[in-house]
Each structure stands twice: as C-alpha cells, then as structure tokens.
Amino acid sequence: MKINEIKSVAQNSPMSINNKKDTSFKGVTDGLIKFWEGVDRGGLAASFTIQDMLGTNIPRTWAAKDVGKDLTGKNNWGAVLENGLREFLTGPSMFVVPGAVYYASMKIGGKSNGVPVQTIKDFSEIINNSNVSTQGKEVFKKDFYGSVLKKVFANFDGIDNIEKIAEKGINLDDYVDEIIKMESAHKKGFWKNIRNIPVPESKEDILAGIVKRFVSDKKANTSGYQDFLKALVTDNRLEDAAKYEIKIDELIKRMIKYSDDLFDSFSKSSDNFEEFLKNFTKKRMGSRFATNIAMGVFTALAMWFIPKIYTINKTNPETDPVRQKASELKGKKSNEVSFGGRNINDVMLQIGEKVAPGNDNWLSKHAGSLESNWINVARPIFYTLITGFTLVPRLIQSTRRDIESSKKNGGPIQWDETSNILRRDITTILTILFAMEGMGAAMGLNASKKSGLVLTSDILRKEDGLLKKIIKIFNPEGGVKVLSKTEATAQMSNFANLDEVIRFLRKNQNYNGDLNKLLHIDAKETKEGVETLYVAAKKVFGDIIDKKDVKVADLVDYIGKNSPKKDDVDALLNLLNNTDKNPLLKFANKINAIFQTVSLAIVTGFLGFGLPKINDFIIKRKYLKNNNTLHPKYNDPNVHIPDYSILNSLKPFERQTYQYFLGNQNKWEN
C-alpha cells in the first residue's frame, strides 16, 4: 500500500485557528515561551532592546552610583545621570529613528515605500503578465491577490503549473476573500498581539489562519522538508531562488501596501495603465531605496549627536573619583580648564532605474542587502550604526574629556575614559550581536543530541572545519539558529497524512536526530487515559520503535507490510496536530525558551554587572594599590612632567640638569 493513501478525516479545517484562550499559565516555562514568542515577532529590534535594556541600560545606570563611592563616601549621581542618558538615548534611538523615517516615507511618498525593491519589481511583472482589472479598487485587489497567489502556488514543485492549482484542491478565492476580510478587520492591540492572546476576527488571527492553511497546502504539494512558512513570487528556476523567499504573512502585508498605493496613485493619473505602471515601478523602487538609505542616515546623525547630550560634564564622573584621589595623594592642586533644483519624481525614476533588480551595476547588486522593515533596519546598516556612528562619536567625546581631565588633575594625558569605552563598548557590541544567539544555538544543538529531536534550523556536520562550525553557531543571519515557536509549529505539526509525518521524521534523521529517542520523548508519561506520542506511534509502527537504532526506512517497511488501522493513524495525526498536546512541540518550545532565557541571563549579567566592575577595577588599579594608596609609579614627579617627551631626546647627564631647571630635585631614572 502507499503511505499517502492513509488520510485523516478528523482534522480541523485548515482555515480555522485555535481561539481557545489559554488562561492556565502552567508555570514559569509557559510564561517564558510566550515571552520569547513575542520577542520573535518583534525581530532584531525586540531582541536587541531586551539585551540592551537588561544588560546595559538598567544595571549600568543603577550600578553607576557606586563608582568611586569607596573613595569619596558619596553616591556618584553624576555617573548615574551620564550612564542613564547614554544608554537610554542610544539603544532606543537605533529603532525609533528609522521607524519614524519609515513611517513618514510611507505617509508622504506612498505605502509602496514599505515594500522591498525586489518585491515591487515582482509584483509589477505579475500584473503585466496577468489580466488585472482597474475598474474599481476591490476588483483590482482581488485580481491582483489572485495573480500573486497563482505565482506562489505554481512555484511549488508538486504543482509547477498554474492550471494544476485547482486540481490540487487549492481554492484561491478562499485565500483572496480571507485577505480582503483581514484588511477591514480590527487589530488586537499591541499587548494582546505580543502575548498572542486570541481575538476572534482580528487582523492578526485571520492572518494566522491564512498562514496555517498555507503551511498545509505547501506540505501537501512540495517534496522534501523545507521551510513551509515561506513563499516565492519570483522565477523558481533561478539558481539562488531560495534567497528571494518571503514569509507568507510578510508577503500578504506587502501585497496590501502595494495594491493600495498603486490603485490610489493610478486613480489620480491621466496616463494609460501600462505606461503608468512602468513609471510607478521605477519611482517606487527609487523611493524605496532612498527610504532605506534615509533610515540609516538619519539614525547615524542621531547617534553622532547623542554623545554631545550625555557628556554634560567636561570630565568623566566615572573616572574622576580615582584620578582626583590620586591627585590628592600626590599633593597636586586642581586647575580648572575649561537635493536641489530637480523634480523629486525624476530623481526617484533615475534611482529606480539604477537599483532595479537584474541591472549590472553595484547599486542593483547590493540594494537587497539594505532592505529595512519599519524599526528593524537591515543588518549591514545596523552594524554600521552600532560601530561607526555609536562607537566613533563616543571616542571623539572621550578623548576631549580625557584631555580636560588630565589638565584638571595634572600630568600628561591619561586615556582612561577612551580605554574604558574601547573595552566596554566593543565587548558589548560583540556580545549583543553574536553571543546570545550563539549560546542559544550551542545549547540547542546539545539538547537535540540528547532528545533526538532537532531543535535548530541547521546542524554542524562532520565535514565542517572548526572555523565553519564557529561561524555557523555565531552567525546571526543564518547558520545554526534555534527554531522559533512559529517555525517549530510549521515543522512538527499540521500533518495531513502519514506520509507527511514520515517526511518530517526523515528530515529529523538526516539532521542527526535520533528516531528512537524522539518517539520515546513522552514514554515515561504513559498511563491509562493519557495521550502520548509513544503509545500512538507504537499502534501505527509496532514494537519496531523500541529498537535502539531504528531508522525511518524501518518504519516505512513495517507499515508497508502491516497496514495500520485508520483509527490509529487518525489518533497519531490528531495528537501531532493539537498544538497544546503535541509532545514534540511542547518539548521544543519549553527547552528553547529555557535556553534563550539562560543565554539572556548570562549576557545581561556580564554586560550589566561584570563588565562595568572589570572597567572600574582596571582604572582603580592603574592609580591605586589594593589599600587605596597611590601606586609608586605616580609618586615619581618625573612621570608626570608635561614636557615628558623632551626627555627622550636628552642624554642622561642632560636630563638631571633639565630636572633641576624645572625645580625637581629627584634624579631622572631610565
């Protein structure tokens, strides 16, 4: 018999969603799962902000009051103010500013400025090759949505032809109607959306239903085991087509923005639609590219200006106490020292022609890497901002204050604040960008090995060299990443038949998962009246699942010779498709939430408390010994003569004469 002949008749409609409100909150792990689910929806901005707030902003501001307290006996409120201004202005600005630019661009220049250049081109080509009516906005939208979805489903290797879509049981009209319905629905609200609280007929829940249906249709009409959350609207025969895939929920949002902007702009134009579309595409590709650049530029300007705000003191209140103490011990006295002429549409048209995908120029080839989405700026822009426009201006300000502080406390320039920033900020940047996700990935790989269930997007292979393995683990844009709850659900649930379950198990096995461990994941919970994967799998696959080295081929061979009962297959499918009871999902979500929380705790603990203590210790030990007496080096007045560099050119006997001339009686020593 064929595996895919065993169908389930007990599944819920794929368009339905689970509207049952979870009010049980079974414990800390449930709260952590919801927390990390919200962070995942927030993208780079949410992940960075969580680490920034917990790891730098709050603890560093709080800890700053104790800097130098052992020397002065007073709270260092100057350091508190400076740390608070620096941390709470810098981090949030990196997302608030680009978000404001993004919003203003869509408000002023059209909603298509919220759609990436490649997608604008793809949508325009789809309209050119389709029968899309412009006789009314709703008709236009329905025709456009249907045409895009035809392209998406035709790219499935199990369909590969628009004419076959209906034959596969895919009703495009249902998809289109749900998208139209979603557009006019109410929003959940920020907090309910972050916490993923079901709100029937809300935009978010209607979209969740569309995504669930899409996952089912993609699983049923594609080979292998791929990312079922992604869609492709460009040519599926491109060698690098995979890099153009878009998450289906994001694709739908882009379709809505683009269609609104295109139809509204056309209704104000006197051009015929074909000519209008050609110019519209060029202008919007140009303005979208300009929006990406503007998001980076305005944020860079804000980052450059912020150090001027928080450095309200001429000297650094964090290093002042120890340097003043050193100055007092030495007996020094403190000395105070105090576009034009061109139509914007023409400009956007020319930029659009340059950045259009497929053109053989530098801008076209690299425009895609600069695509930003609201508060989530593109990673190359983010890296540039956090290094070039956060670190550099801080260093410029710190050098000025180090010079000022050295004048105040006497002696040559001591680069205390500058070295402090280099240690603190470079370490912080590297930690936030790479450490947390890397630690989570490393723990996920270890848990996958022990549980038999692969919990990461990729794995480390034997043929990978050490450097490649390190890059895979710590690369935030790819490599090995812990599966989010949405990704885990798409992979480990929503099975239409036993064949899809077998495909999942095969993929897990190919990624070094252990089938025996996986099918025994809840075996210890086996008791009367309790649904477990172990019992359900044993009814379908028999005692073969108890073999230590059982493989997918063994399961396929068994069910080929021993036809499982339909009721037993339905029971297995129903258990896996129930996201509240699926033991694989429960384990994956729990263990990944715990790992991410542990990683966050380690990162924030180090950044918030460990690193500042290290800096404070280094600066203090530079000037003072353990008993807070002056370091012998700084007792020697010769070390602190402003004209120190002159001595290097003098002969030994000349140095002593020069010292006497300056009023220093101590002999110069090499």
Image (tube, rainbow, N blue to C red):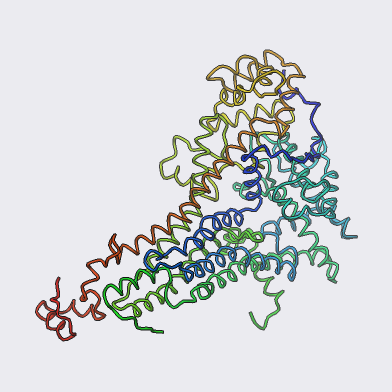
**Is residue 160 visible in the rendered structure shown here?**
no
Q: Position of residue 470 (x, y in %)?
A: 44, 45
In the rendered view, tell whether residue 558 sits above or below residue 225: above
**Is residue 409 visible in the rendered structure shown here?**
yes
Q: Is residue 341 left or right of residue 463?
A: right
Residue 648 sits in quarter: bottom left
Q: Position of residue 220 (x, y in %)?
A: 73, 34
Identify the residue at the far bottom of this view.
661
Name the one closer to the observer, 631 or 597.
631
Name the one closer to the observer, 212 or 309.
309
Residue at the spot 52% in from the left edge and 34% down from the top edge = 447
Residue 540 sits in quarter: top right
Q: How many marks?
A: 0
Q: Is residue 447 left or right of residue 610?
A: right
Q: Is residue 1 left or right of residue 555?
A: right
Q: Quadrant of the N terminus?
A: top right
Identify the residue at the far right of this view.
135
Residue at the spot 15% in from the left edge and 83% down from the top edge = 658
Q: Position of residue 129 (x, y in %)?
A: 78, 54
Residue at the spot 58% in from the left edge and 54% down from the top edge = 50
Q: Quadrant of the C terminus?
A: bottom left
Identify the residue at the far left of this view.
653
Residue at the spot 71% in from the left edge and 49% down from the top edge = 233
Q: Is residue 472 left or right of residue 590?
A: left
Q: Position of residue 654 (x, y in %)?
A: 11, 81
Name the one closer to the observer, 552 or 206.
206
